[in-house]
Image: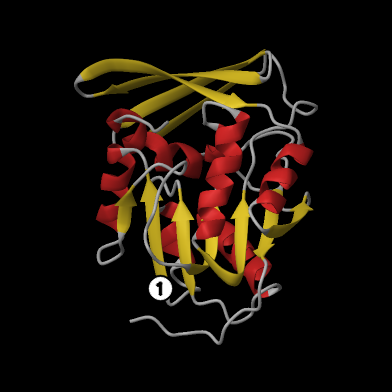
Amino acid sequence: MGYGAAHAELYDPVFLSRGKDFEAEAEGLNRLVRSRLPGARSLLDVACGTGAHLENLAKHFDHVEGLDHSPAMREVARGRLPGVAVHPGDMRDFELHRTFDVVTCMGSGLAEVDSPEQMAGSVARMSAHLAPGGVLIVEPWYFPDNFLDGHAAGHLFREDGRVVSRLTHSARHGDKSRVEIRFMIVDSSGFREFTEVVVKYLLPKERYEAAFERAGCSVEFVPGFSLADGRPNSPGLFVGVRAGEAAEPVRHA
């Protein structure tokens, strides 16, 4: 789990050049939260990556924090979010010793675990960091019935005197998907290239829903919430609410 320094450096430029709008997505997430918990003021973004969502979510919540397993991603996030706590941690076993009104997990990082049981355990850890009545929002990976086996994609962009190409190939291996990502970069110093492989579970919608319910959250799947990240057949979002009555909101310093 987690990306290296070279990938972390290119993560935002790649997705922004493909039309991803982190600000609009944060506004959409805020609307989903407010429809369930109007007074929400604190938020934790699990697998926050470079902090691009968190930077925009901070416009809607009084207090935000992030957590990510990758040192390279955390370094980028901390650089763009001075004064915001970006914790090292693994979603499978993290403990921050406090709760939040909202916990988010975007970018399908939840599927990058070693087993379906670890996915459920990760949802339980997120739920444990929610205040009663708090909202948990998770972006899943593809489901088995909408994964495009053998899908090949490519993208090229120019920025600051360099040209970057990103090629991907997705293949199904039983109940997992293997996504190979190849970068080639050329600038004034010449060429460099690297490859990363990401393995994610192809879990049915019902498996995610069962994990939410086991973690003490009601859950609704919102299929119409399309994230503009260039993924065909983007599944949508799971939105859960932890059992219990929400307390009066407390303003965080």
Residue at 38% in and 62% down? 65
Say which residue label 1 marks.
63
Is residue 111 shown to the viewer in this render? yes
Instruction: Name the residue at 42% across, 31% down.
Output: 1
> Quick check: 1 above or below 37?
above
Give percent across and percent down for residue 131: 54, 70
188, 149: nearer the viewer:
149
Q: Residues within 10 Å of mark 1 (few under 14, many from 20)?
A: many
Judge left or right: residue 136 versus residue 72: right
x and y percent of residue 187 in the render?
Answer: 26, 25
In front here: 148 or 71?
71
Q: Is 152 situated above or below 62? A: above
Which kind of residue does numbered mark 1 sit on? His
Residue at the image point whose x is 26% and y is 46% from the top: 75
Q: Is residue 20 visible?
A: no
Whether 74 is drawn above or below 40: the answer is above
